[in-house]
Amino acid sequence: MRTDEFAGICMEHVKKYPDMFHVRIEETKTSVPRSFSITGSFVDVVVKYMNLRPSKTLTTRFFVNYQKSKCTTQVIGKTKFSKMPRQIAEFLHLQEPERYTGN
């Protein structure tokens, strides 16, 4: 997925089933909708993230800022998503983490 597609995911794009989440991406660069499923132990991670979402959040965007063990009402934009691969590579102590980009 592209970084702006991640940033554009809204709560209504994420549908919860008993053992999985289904995410549908409507607006894509190629104008072809896409979808994916979240299963297994990752379902618990998504549930935990959703429970951290402040009730006073006015936005319908799914991803909000997470820092100091809690979510804020500020949304995450495509720039922050594009920085995440490098941050993950640094955390995992991979060689040349600067080569991991969100492009």
Image (cartoon, rainbow, N blue to C red):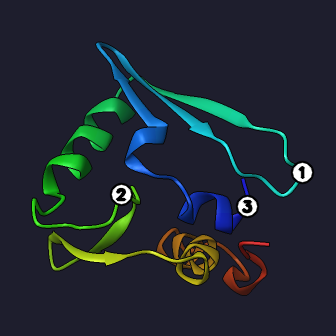
User: Residue 30: percent from the left, percent from the top?
Assistant: 89, 51
Instruction: Point out the tag, 3 or 1, that comes first from the N-terminus.
Output: 3
Is 13 situated above or below 88?
Answer: above
Above or below, comparing residue 82 to residue 39 in the picture: below
Which residue is identified by label 1? Answer: 30
Q: Which residue is mark 3?
A: 2
Mark 1, other Cα within 10 Å: few <14 / some 14–19 / many ≥20: few
The residues tagged by marks 3 and 2 sit, at their Cα atoms, a distance apart of 19 Å
The residue positioned farthest toward the front in the image shown: 58
Residue reaching furthest to the right: 30
Amino acid type of the residue that numbered disc 2 sits on in the rendered structure? Thr
Q: Amino acid at mark 3?
A: Arg
**In the image, 54: left or right of 76?**
left
Q: Secondary structure at mark 1?
A: loop
Q: x and y percent of residue 6 in the render?
A: 58, 59
Which residue is at 72% across, 36% downward? 34
Quarter that holds the C terminus: bottom right
**Which residue is at a point 11% across and 66% down the rendered structure image?**
56
Q: Earlier in the sequence, mark 2 or mark 1?
A: 1
Q: Is residue 22 left or right of residue 71?
A: right
The residue to which callout 2 is attached is: 60
Residue type, mark 1 in image = Thr
- Residue extending farthest to the top is 18
Q: 65 left or right of 50?
A: right
Q: Closer to the camera, 40 or 95?
A: 40
Residue 73 figure quarter: bottom left
Q: Give me the residue at 84% from left, 40% from top.
A: 32
Where residue 81 appears, x then y in whole percent? 57, 72
The reply to whether the C-beta atoms of the residues labelled 3 and 1 are less than 8 Å apart is no
Q: CA distance from mark 3 to mark 1?
A: 11 Å
